[in-house]
Amino acid sequence: ELAPVCVGMSILPNRACALLGAALTIAALAGTPVPAEGQTPGSTALQDGMQHYRSGNPEAAIPAFERALESDSSQREAYVLLSSSLLQTGRVDRARRVAETGLERFPRAPALHLARAEALVQAERWPEALASYERVHRRARAGTSLPGGLSAEDVSDRIGRLHLQIGG
């Protein structure tokens, strides 16, 4: 079964799409503690968005993640999950812009690089997508941990499929 972020994609096999979707979700959710007493509006909105996201309702998650970022733009997880939710609802260009905004704040976040790459693939912006995947691959080979059990080999597989898609 295809992961929601990969719906309509032809270059990634089911396993790779499932891994990418899981990686983005796990990357965002794993580092997000459940807010304690004295929650901020941003943490409450993030939790609301995550509840919608986990229940498979990205459309309802989007405004919650937007509120979370308006309240506290330092929430890396909100950028990742907002981008993923936007991809799931077909708003590819906006998903890319959200990932890029997150990368301005968190330039070394693999999940944001993966979200950007996924949006670029869906927009058929092959060279840019390829460059994004290659950046993640270089970091993974250098020892950077990738989210959700994604490996350097998985990214290498994506790169190979992308080369096939663009004929190079």
Image: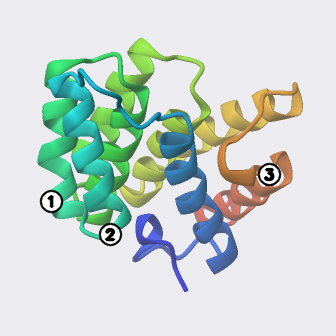
Question: From the viewer's perspective, is residue 29 above or below residue 33?
Answer: below
Q: CA distance from mark 3 to mark 2?
A: 31 Å
Residue shown at the point (52%, 17%) measured from the top left = 107
Q: Is residue 93 visible?
A: no
54 or 69: nearer the viewer = 54
Choose the circle earlier in sequence order: 3 or 1. Answer: 1
Choose the circle earlier in sequence order: 1 or 2. Answer: 2
Indicate the amino acid at tag 3: Ser
Q: Which residue is mark 2?
A: 55
Q: Quadrant of residue 27?
A: top right
Q: How is the image coloured?
A: rainbow
Q: Which residue is mark 3?
A: 156
Of marks 3 and 1, the one in the foreground: 1
108 or 55: nearer the viewer = 55
Query: Tag 2's secondary structure?
Result: loop
Q: Which residue is mark 1?
A: 60
Query: Tag 1's secondary structure?
Result: helix
Indicate the amino acid at tag 2: Ser
Q: CA distance from mark 1 to mark 2?
A: 10 Å
Question: Around disc 3, counting alpha carbons within 10 Å, would you say few (fewer than 14), some (14 to 19), or many (20 or more)?
Answer: some
Choose the circle earlier in sequence order: 3 or 2. Answer: 2
The C terminus is located in which quarter? bottom right
Residue 124, position as x, y percentages in the image: 41, 57
Farthest residue in the front direction? 37
Question: Around disc 2, counting alpha carbons within 10 Å, would you say few (fewer than 14), some (14 to 19), or many (20 or more)?
Answer: few
Residue shown at the point (26%, 53%) measured from the top left = 86
Q: Is residue 109 visible?
A: yes
Left or right position of 36 against 10: left
Q: CA distance from mark 3 to mark 1?
A: 34 Å
Residue shown at the point (28%, 26%) measured from the top left = 37
Indicate the amino acid at tag 1: Ala
Residue 16, position as x, y percentages in the image: 67, 67
